[in-house]
Amino acid sequence: MKINLGRYKNNGSARTQKVQIDKWDSWSADHSMALIIAPLLKQLRDDTHGYPGEEGMTMAKWKKILDKMIWSFEQLNGDDNESQFYSGKIDWIETKLPNGNTECKKGPNDTFKVDTKGLIKHNKKIQDGLNLFGKYFRNLWD
């Protein structure tokens, strides 16, 4: 992926733009976009001079909302953002079945565990930030 967005021009004409999307960029499009969105949101949060004009919104509240969005996209950037919820070692025994399929069963040394409640809570927090991104998408300007 290569993106080159020119500066806004003072005469009101459109800025130059060149976007090249490679085939591998769409393999995990969510990850590809998160790599761009997280730093863009950080810059917006650090340089912002305004916030959405809805009732009760303040600059402090807006920055907290941006932080939630940033956190969500940063989680999606990492390949191991869920590894904290896994522990132990996987030990599988594979057995060939007469029909040609393979059956897998836990081996005697399998200690693998998943903190399911923690994982669900983590993914809900990510989704909450993504929902805020959708809700405020048209307010992401300075």
Image (tube, rainbow, N blue to C red):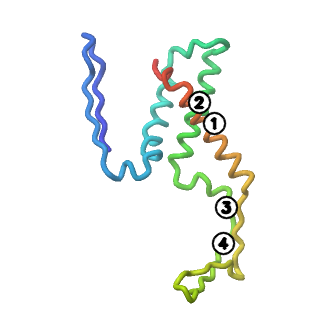
Check disc 1 and report the residue beneath it: 128
Three-letter residue code for mark 2 = Leu
The structure residue drawn at horizontal position 64% and vertical position 46%, both measured from the top left corner, is 123
Viewer-proximal residue among 93 and 73: 93
Marker disc for residue 45: none
Farthest residue, direction right: 117
Check disc 4 and report the residue beneath it: 89
Marker disc for residue 132: 2
- For the residue carrying disc 4, how many other residues have a C-alpha within 10 Å: few (<14), some (14-19), or many (20+)? few
Tell whether label 3 touches label 4 (CB within 8 Å): no
Q: Is residue 138 left or right of residue 88?
A: left
N-terminal of the pair, mark 1 or mark 4, is 4
Three-letter residue code for mark 1 = Asp
- Describe the element under mark 4 as helix, strand or loop: loop
Farthest residue, direction bottom: 98
Tell whether label 2 touches label 1 (CB within 8 Å): yes
Alpha carbon separation for disc pair 4 and 3: 9 Å
- Of badges 1 and 4, the one in the foreground is 1
- Describe the element under mark 3 as helix, strand or loop: strand
Three-letter residue code for mark 3 = Tyr
N-terminal of the pair, mark 2 or mark 4, is 4
Three-letter residue code for mark 4 = Lys
Q: Is residue 25 left or right of residue 13?
A: right
Viewer-proximal residue among 78 and 95: 95
